[in-house]
Amino acid sequence: MIEKMEFFNLTGPKTQIDRVAEQYLSKYPVHLENALSELHTVKNLRPITDGNLYQNDLRRAKELMAFFTDSKQQPETQKECSQMTIEQAAEIVRSIDQNLDSLNSQKAKLEQELESLTASRNQIHPFRELNYDISKIIQFRCIKFRFGRIPKDYYKKLESFVFNTIDTILYQCGENEEYVWLVYFVPAPVADKIDAIYASLHFEKLAIPKEYSGTPQEIADSLEEQIRSLKASIQGIEEKIRNILKDHQVSLSAACQKLEFYSQNFDIRKLAACMNWDDHTFFILCGWMPKQDIKRFQEDLKTESDLVLIIEENHNNIISKPPTKLKNPALFRPFEMFIRMYGLPDYNEFDPTVLIGLTYSFLFGFMFGDVGQGLCLLIGGYLLYRTKKINLAAIISCCGLFSTIFGFLFGSIFGFEDIIEAAWLRPGQAMTTLPFIGRLNTVFVITVALGMGIIVITMILNIINSFQSHDVEKTWFDTNGAAGLVFYLSLILVIVLFMTGNPLPASAVMAVMFGLPLILLFFKEPLSALAEKKAAHLEGGKGMFIVQGLFELFEVMLSYFSNTVSFVRVGAFAVSHAAMMEVVLMLSGYESGTTNWIVVVFGNLLVCGMEGLIVGIQVLRLEYYELFSRFYRGTGRAFEAYQTSQKS
């Protein structure tokens, strides 16, 4: 079912909008609408364009909270948060931040120095194999030197083709999968020429600071020691910060929660409007609330002299249509997943959740009737739903229940049909003789009759939905309207009388039973226009109207036949399930008395998984194409509670 909604306008001083959101709107499911759009006829309304006042304080509070490795909330935090005002929360964060300014400045300076030393360490590290004092190399005058790296592929070319033909001394220092780090020396007069050769081989020159003294290994060790010392100093400062924060952990955590709530809640201004009145600025909020909650909301606001709540009882005066909030029994709630996949029902539309829950489970059980496999689906789906809260698992469990029931009716347990007696019939063996048709599987006859009943129900639902939405054509003259229902019921009556050997109605009666509905279907457009007191418009002229009408009538009668016969698949799967399990038992040697239980178990798992999936998809197809397409629009919009996840 769909919850009844009430539209409200809430007005109060703009300075209290955050308090109202925290104290009242956070307690109820509220679907807010854009107040400027809803109240477009009200003069002097304007949007609220304030910037988020709490964003900076919240960002700093989260940075401070990051120092705590234990994210477990203290029991007293929630209590202190509820007693704290937003001004107190901001002041707590600013006060702590001010106390930590000196330590943070020291830490930032050390981190900058650490970054510089780390870069230097990484630069000198690949040259550790060079066992020579760098300061002496830097003092060379007649010999030029270059520190750098070269891709491995080009280094091989350098060794093979160039090295022996140029005036250079090369020293390989280190390598990885991509590069070789090296130092090369050249005479000063030919330095430019040699540098060009190395550059053509993608040599990347690295600058070595002049203040380095000692071998690369000694320099790297010295830098590593300085890095360790800096890290220790930074850790010491962080420990001091952590100790200071630990003394204020409860109040800081409470302030962070309060600021987060207010910061998130600040976006409520995007949907609000404001106006001035006698030097005061007031906010206006509009939205929808379930009818059962609006009364409690009114009671809460009785003590608020500055807040005014107005409930609009006439929905025709409201621009936006009411949102859809489904409310179904817990047993059928998982089936809402299928409804949302197709589209939520409109506010004034019939909610088909219970219908799809019953028909889906029933048809699945009919197509997959087996006591053993049904119990596996029932228990497995239930356990998975209890542990993981997966809606599909709950649906599987419901289907498993009906599979178990039909398993008893069909006398099948894990494919064995000689353990229990069939309480009703066996799908592969039951046959029925019908006039004109001959012998036919009883299951096929039953499923066609079942399909007729379901189609009649959907036609009735379409009439109800169309009547509530004031759609004259779909109520009276549509294929699934009153005219179509009379035609289809007449067809069912004639078929039943013929199949049971009873006399058919007189020709005149049958002419009225079939002729009148077809005439209404043929002239549905002009008749609808006449009923709505509008001028009928025949697009393409009378000739085209007649041709189009004849083709549409043919399509209507063909669709009645095809939609009804479509339910034969329900019986076909029931028969095929029994046949597949018979094949499994035959392969296991059960008929010869030497049963291979591994084949039985594996075969049951294969059939249960493969056919269960196929049957589930086929039943969903029947629901969407044979049921929903007849009566369901699915044009509703979801009820989105503004405060669902923002409660402090």
Image (spheres, rainbow, N blue to C red):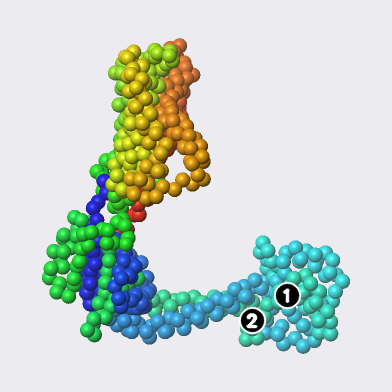
The residue that mark 2 highlights is: 214
Q: Report how far apart the C-alphas of labels 2 and 1 lie in the structure.
A: 16 Å
From the viewer's side, name the closer residue of 35 and 329: 35
Total number of numbered discs in the rendering: 2
Query: In the rendered image, which quarter is residue 449 located in?
Result: top left
Q: Residue at x 30, y 69 (%)?
A: 39
Give residue 465's quadrant in the image. Answer: top left
Amino acid bearing label 1:
Val
Left or right: residue 367 versus residue 190 is left
Residue at screen point 47% across, 20% down: 583
Q: Amino acid at mark 2?
A: Gly
108 relative to 335, above or below: below
Task: Give the residue displayed 23% in from the left and 64% down from the top.
Answer: 8
Residue 50, image x, y percentages: 34, 78
| Mark 1 surroundings: few (<14), some (14-19) or many (≥20) residues within 10 A | some
x then y, percent, for residue 412: 35, 21
Residue where numbered disc 1 is placed: 183
421 or 280: nearer the viewer: 280
User: Where is residue 340 drawn, in percent x and y?
Assistant: 37, 48
> Quick one: SS at disc 2?
loop
Residue 205 placement: quadrant: bottom right
Is the C-beta separation of discs 2 and 1 under 8 Å?
no
Sequence-earlier tag: 2 or 1: 1
- 370 vs 553, left or right, is left
SS for callout 1: strand
Note whether 368 is above or below 475 in the view shown: above
User: Could you tell me if residue 148 is visible in this image?
Assistant: yes
